[in-house]
Image: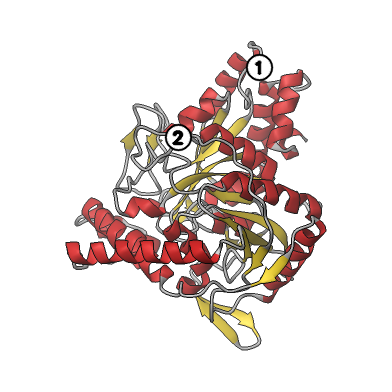
């Protein structure tokens, strides 16, 4: 069952000649045929293109690190010769070139299997639209796979893809990864360029959005991140590939919940297990709560919700009747345009909060915390029962993800158990800006200490 190998193992098998790129692609296409009609994880499957590229690469000596390995791309990145829809009936954009991340994956030798499903214009924590329908959670079809990279997470969790690229503007990589039981990484803003993404996110809203890798193991995510990072001439916020730097971790801060927002008990139990694993790795753990960041989710909502909403309203114009309800609930049809003073004040507040977090994280280069207050929810749910008479609504439930979008810090989500319903739960590892490699290095050690989790049954 080749499709159940890790992405790193697939690359090794191709390099050694034990498996061909044709065999890998055929194994994944067969798996897609088997489970995608139920999951609806894909918006497009590149059957002929993937087979042709696999046959071409099979005739060549392995070159790039991903030579002959199939991957998937969230429907929100340009792919030359392919129509991008971003889950919307209003959009049909025929791409003349590859997005930067797509071009870099191809340069590394990867084969594109398909585009994965998204909510309309990437604007919801659940993946559903009029074109492809609803992507369901591979572990339990009555629950959402999350959003906006929900199709990507479902494809990877169900062995239709070994890994790929999503984008994260408010937890859009990390929330679906948490819900579907895979690994997702939001890099420091700028480490991976955003050129060729849609909808384009102009400044200052672009401050909170980053592409990033998704896979089933941290090692796979590290491999993908290494291929897609670096300066992007189409993204003015992108950065050159930095020199490796070693950072000591005297202590990991354990932040159990975002202030007064209650967190699901199974997620708290996962934090306990993860903290114990980090201690086994020789790291000290100290329970903390960063102070003064309560307003961070609201400031994030200004950039990603209000400013980005202006752009979406301009695009939709008078065609609201053709948009999906998940878009309509997140983007109001009418809203006042913020003046320059308000935008400047929000930028100033972002910097104040960022400095506050940096100062408090000096003794704690890494934080261990929940990725969200809840596991996967049922489609359409917006208030969630945590047991013991506690409930939480969606906006505060996602604060532990959106906080790091606002501040631009790197954050890794990796699975650490299951609820009694059989839904995955994860933990989140957060680092200081530009310490992406440290987050991934410790994340890999944490994953190894955790050991194997149960596999998704056929």
- In the picture provided, is 278 more to the left or to the right than 72? right
* Disc ID at residue 296: none
Q: Residue 142 location in percent, x, y? A: 61, 64
Q: Secondary structure at mark 2?
A: loop
Q: Residue at x 46, y 50 (%)?
A: 118
- Marks 2 and 1: which is nearer the front? 2
What number is the disc on residue 62?
1
Measured along the vertical axis of the image, is residue 2 above or below residue 445? above
Look at 41% across and 66% down and name the residue there: 353
Q: Quadrant of the N terminus?
A: top right
Q: Above or below — where is 191 with respect to 429? A: above
Coloring applied to the structure: secondary structure
Q: Nearer the viewer, residue 354 or 383?
A: 354
236, above or below 303, in the image:
above
Q: Cα distance, mark 2 to mark 1?
A: 27 Å
Residue beneath disc 2: 240
Q: Is residue 37 visible?
A: no
In the picture, measured across the screen, residue 241 lies left or right of residue 339, that is: right
Residue 296 drawn at (x, y percent) = 42, 69
Identify whether 12 is placed above or below 193.
above
Other-residue count near label 2 (Cα within 10 Å), few / some / many at <14 / 14–19 / ≥20: few
Q: Position of residue 165 (x, y in %)?
A: 53, 41
Q: In the rendering, at what x and y percent does residue 219 appear? A: 69, 41
> Which residue is located at x 44 percent, y 59 percent?
407
Left or right: 382 in relation to 164 = left
């Amino acid at each position: 069952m080749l499709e159940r190998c890790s992405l790193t193992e697939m690359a090794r098998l191709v390099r050694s000649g034990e498996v061909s790129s044709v065999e890998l692609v055929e194994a994944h296409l067969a798996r897609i045929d088997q489970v995608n009609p139920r999951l609806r994880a894909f918006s497009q499957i590149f059957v002929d293109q993937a087979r042709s590229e696999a046959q071409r690469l099979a005739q060549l000596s392995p070159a790039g690190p991903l030579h002959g390995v199939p991957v998937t791309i969230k429907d929100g990145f340009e792919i030359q010769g392919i129509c991008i829809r971003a889950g919307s009936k209003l959009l049909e954009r025929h791409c003349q070139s590859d997005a930067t991340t797509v071009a870099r994956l191809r340069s590394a030798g990867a084969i594109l299997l398909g585009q994965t499903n998204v909510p309309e214009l990437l604007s919801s924590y659940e993946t559903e639209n009029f074109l492809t329908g609803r992507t369901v959670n591979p572990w339990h079809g009555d629950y959402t796979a999350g959003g906006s990279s929900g199709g990507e997470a479902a494809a990877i969790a169900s062995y239709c893809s070994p890994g790929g690229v999503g984008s994260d503007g408010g937890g859009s990589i990390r929330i679906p990864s948490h819900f579907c039981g895979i690994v997702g990484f939001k890099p420091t803003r700028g480490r991976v360029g955003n050129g060729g993404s849609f909808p384009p996110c102009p400044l200052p809203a672009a401050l909170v959005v980053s592409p990033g890798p998704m896979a089933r193991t941290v090692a796979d995510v590290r491999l993908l991140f290494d291929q897609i990072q670096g300066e992007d001439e189409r993204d003015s916020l992108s950065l050159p590939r930095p020199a490796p730097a070693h950072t000591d971790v005297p202590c990991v801060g354990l932040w159990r919940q975002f202030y007064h927002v209650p967190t699901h008990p199974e997620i708290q139990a996962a934090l306990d297990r993860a903290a114990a694993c980090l201690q086994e790795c020789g790291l000290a753990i100290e329970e903390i709560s960063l102070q003064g960041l309560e307003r961070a989710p609201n400031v994030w909502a200004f950039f990603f919700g209000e400013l980005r909403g202006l752009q979406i309203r301009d695009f939709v114009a008078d065609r609201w009747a053709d948009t999906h309800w998940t878009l309509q609930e997140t983007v109001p049809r009418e809203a006042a345009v913020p003046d320059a003073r308000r935008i400047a004040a929000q930028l100033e507040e972002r910097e104040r909060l960022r400095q506050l977090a940096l100062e408090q994280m000096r003794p704690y280069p890494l934080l261990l915390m929940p990725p969200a207050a809840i596991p996967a929810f049922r489609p359409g749910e917006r208030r969630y029962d945590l047991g013991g008479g506690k409930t939480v609504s969606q906006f505060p439930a996602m604060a532990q993800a959106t906080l790091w979008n606002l501040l631009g810090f790197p954050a890794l989500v990796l699975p650490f158990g299951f609820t009694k319903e059989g839904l995955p739960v994860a933990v989140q590892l957060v680092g200081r800006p530009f310490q992406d490699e440290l987050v991934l290095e410790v994340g890999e050690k944490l994953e190894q200490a955790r050991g194997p989790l149960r596999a998704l049954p056929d």
